[in-house]
Image (cartoon, rainbow, N blue to C red):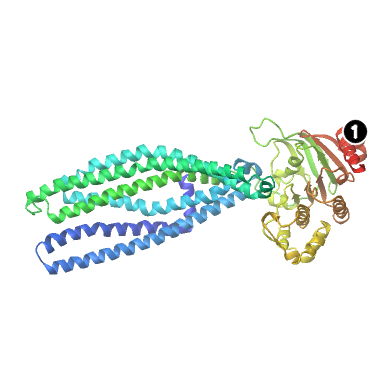
Amino acid sequence: MIRRLARCVREYKWAAIASPLCMAGEVTMELLIPLVMADLYDYGIALQDMGYVLQKSLVLVVCALASLMFGVASAVAASKAATGFAKNLRHDMYHHVQSFSFSNIDKFSSSSIVTRLTSDVANLQMTFQMMIRMTIRCTMMLVMALVMALRISTRLSTIYMVAIPVLVLALVALVPVVFKIFDRVFKTYDRLNNVVQENVRGIRVVKSFVREGRETEKFTEISGAIFKDFCKAEKILALNDPIMKLCVYSCMLSISWVGAQMVVASGNDAAVGLTTGQLSSMFTYTTQILMGLMSMSMVFVMMTMSRAPMRRCYEILEEQPDLCYPEDALTEVADGSIDFENVSFRYSATAQHRALKEVDLHIPSGATVGILGGTGSSKTTLVQLIPRLYDVSEGVLKVGGVDVRQYDLQALRDQVAVVLQKNVLFSGTIRENLRWGDPNATDEELIHACKLACAHEFIESFPDGYDTYIEQGGTNVSGGQRQRLCIARALLKKPKILILDDSTSAVDTRTDALIRQAFREEIPGTTKLIIAQRVASVQEADLIVVMDGGQIHAAGTHEELLQTSHIYREVYQSQRKGGEE
């Protein structure tokens, strides 16, 4: 997992290497300062040698300046490496998500993907920056300060051998408990993000039903759960601080007591015991050793917190797209013919219920096919298999006489335009939204497509026309206008197959009829699949398919179905009766 995420460093690897090297220089300078201070005290101040004092003072200034320069260089390099790592990781995850099929996306909720791309990556960025700086600093400071202390006095250094195991045992006991809590916290963040997304997306519904209070309660409940978990984790981590201070002050007292006895016994003769300058250096090294351990404990805490985000980001990167195609995939779709040959479909391999059951259907190129059925009859599921938004579980689906799994995905989807039930427009001008269908479309082609979709008239009524800005999700246009813009966008692809999934439900019957008439006259060679709830929208189709319970209940023309299908006849009569009334 770490190796996979480490690939995201890429072009910033030199900054990632430079940071610990500069940090090593900073630590070296800091460790030299106590030695120079000891010599300054023992051989300069004690002997009143001002020349030696000035010489060592100059060395101290050089060491301090060098430490500062190394520290600044390390911080700059670490910041560059960490932000670059986060940028590459976020890019890799987002790029990989784009290759997911619908079934892959179904495994991760949209709120979870957003959290992983934002909060989780930010946590990993912070951890990475701390690792390439603090890890090397803690390790070097601990090891080198311990070596220096041993060099001064082996007897006094044995005091550390008691303190260090105590701190290590404390870390070993605390980290596993804290990890479980943080793992739960990040899952709760997904729920929080989901609540916020739902509320913002459906704010009009929330206000129309006066449910602001309930939505606030939901948010407060989940936010409170995060608060409680964080408090619990921080309470456990807070135990680390008193244990650390206990060890630091115990070491200080022990070194003061034993060291003072050694200084008195030696008579300030280093060959016999310990000098005053060496004792002061031991105090400094004691602080550095134990502060190094404290910093290392914080690094462990950060790594513990980052284990959950690391795993979650790794799951995104390692998720294999369900849809694949051969290396010699076809890039040309011969025509718009569609053949379902004993097709069955499950939304997951473990699902017991089949959404589609043994569907056999032949649609010739250029035909207009209407699809009717009750809610949950798998109408949408049927058409989503055509552009390979999902793969069939059993049987074969052919487009242009070739199994869809043999096509290059981009080539297939370029020839299949789908206007889904949920019409989505993106923030930008109407012109920019339409050019999703064809980035190189001329203004004349845009206008022609909009006229076919009966959208040109209302677009021209806007003050800015085709340069009218569309808010995110198309909230500043009506449902019917949004549907017609999406139809025009699909027409610009000049597809061989056009699928309208209940895409005229928000327009009036007259506009619906005008759109269908334009389709018959202007794009007769395009295979058109129209899912509708109104019989009037499909009764002139070459073939009408009635779906029921994931199966084809009946198929035929309007007149044939009135004779053979009781479902179709009941729908037709109920709608006709309502019209007469």
For the residue labelled by badge 1, is the local secondary structure a helix, a strand or a loop? Answer: helix
Q: Nearer the viewer, residue 392 or 102?
A: 102
Q: Is residue 14 visible?
A: no
Q: Is residue 80 visible?
A: yes
Q: Could you say where residue 518 lies in the image, as x and y percent from the top left?
A: 86, 55
Decide if residue 4 is on the left or right side of residue 75: right
Badge 1 density bin: few <14, some 14–19, many ≥20, Cα 10 Å: few
Q: Could you say where residue 378 lies in the image, as x and y percent from the top left?
A: 75, 38
Q: Amino acid at mark 1?
A: Thr
Location of residue 570 by image quarter: top right
Q: Could you say where residue 183 lies in the image, as x and y percent from the top left?
A: 48, 40
User: Residue at point 73% right, 53% down?
Assistant: 414
The vertical placement of 404 against 66, above or below, is above
Q: Nearer the viewer, residue 358 or 376?
A: 376
Quick one: which residue is furthest to the top in this view?
A: 352
The vertical placement of 533 against 485, above or below, is above
The vertical placement of 425 against 580, above or below, is below
Q: In which quadrant is the C terminus drawn?
A: top right
- Write down the residue under mark 1: 564
User: Residue at point 39% right, 57% down?
Assistant: 17
Decide if residue 231 is on the left or right side of residue 323: left
Number of labels in the image equals: 1
Decide if residue 52 is on the left or right side of residue 94: left
Q: Could you say where residue 530 lies in the image, as x and y percent from the top left?
A: 81, 46
User: Residue at point 32% right, 45% down?
Assistant: 241
Location of residue 427 by image quarter: bottom right
Location of residue 428 by image quarter: bottom right
